[in-house]
Amino acid sequence: MQRIDIENPTRKKIVMLLKKHGGMTTDELSRFLNITPMGIRQHLLALEKRGIITYELKKGGIGRPGFIYSLTEGAENLFPKSYHRLVIDILEEIEKKEGIKKVEDLFRWRKARLLKERQAVLGDITSMEEKVKAMSSILDREGYLVEYDRDDHNYYIRQYNCPLSAVARRYSQCCKYELQLYRDLFSKKVTRKGCIAEGSTACVYSIPKR
């Protein structure tokens, strides 16, 4: 999923308050920020349009019904994550205790699982072009920022984001088995023309038409 940036300082404060306190009402945000409820609602509406916040009806109480505002799942992209460091630490411990072959096994097992999942989705598609397009759509939804292209001889999938690039820079097996995944799905002749982990701006896979 694409990272969301917030330039408006008041909206940044609203997002931070919702992150720290969970669901909050307009009146609660108004008191924290010393802004009128009407002003808060304008900022909330802008954040809602960008998919950063959501709301639900406040239960209980008397008088006019109100709403509880909270962050969406997509809003988590606003906050730094260090999952790659955790993954690398785990892999390094496995390598130290059980050897590099066990690390290799893990990447191979992951490839086998992904292959099964992809085949379940793409298996009924007979046209190579439609299969490549479908794969591009799947990856794009998963946050790889994908572009699909073709020329007279090949189809191309360009991945401008790699969620595992930090891991791949430490363990090349990650890229090795991703290429193998493409070859198992499409053709043994698939080649990789660029790799983010090796300094390219995109991971580019070339898939022959024949």
Image (cartoon, rainbow, N blue to C red):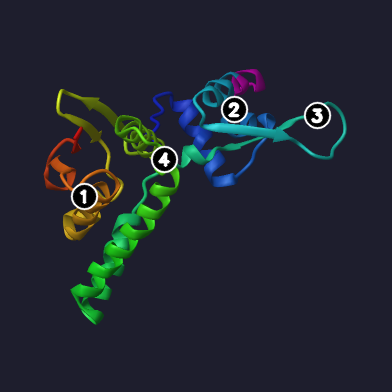
Q: Amino acid at mark 4?
A: Asn
Q: Which of the two labelled residues, at mark 4 and mark 2, occupies the earlier sequence position?
A: 2
Q: Which residue is mark 3?
A: 65
- Residue 114 pos. (x, y %): 37, 53
**Image x and y of residue 202, in percent:** 19, 36
In the image, the segment drawn in magenta is 34-41
Secondary structure of the residue carrying numbered label 4: helix
Q: The disc labelled 3 sits on which kind of residue?
A: Pro
* Label 3 crowd bin: few (<14), some (14–19), many (20+), radius 10 Å: few
Q: CA distance from mark 4 to mark 1?
A: 27 Å
Read off the residue under disc 2: 34
Observer able to see residue 194: no
| Above/below status of 188 relative to 103 | above
The residue carrying mark 1 is 179
Earlier in the chain: of badge 4 and badge 3, it is: 3
Q: In the displayed structure, does residue 155 sit left or right of residue 50? A: left
Estimate the x, y position of residue 171 in percent, counting from the top left: 19, 60
In this rendering, position of residue 74 left or right of residue 133: right
Q: Amino acid at mark 1?
A: Leu
Give the number of the mark in front: 4 or 3: 4
Q: Residue furthest bottom?
A: 97
Q: CA distance from mark 3 to mark 1?
A: 54 Å
Residue under label 4: 77
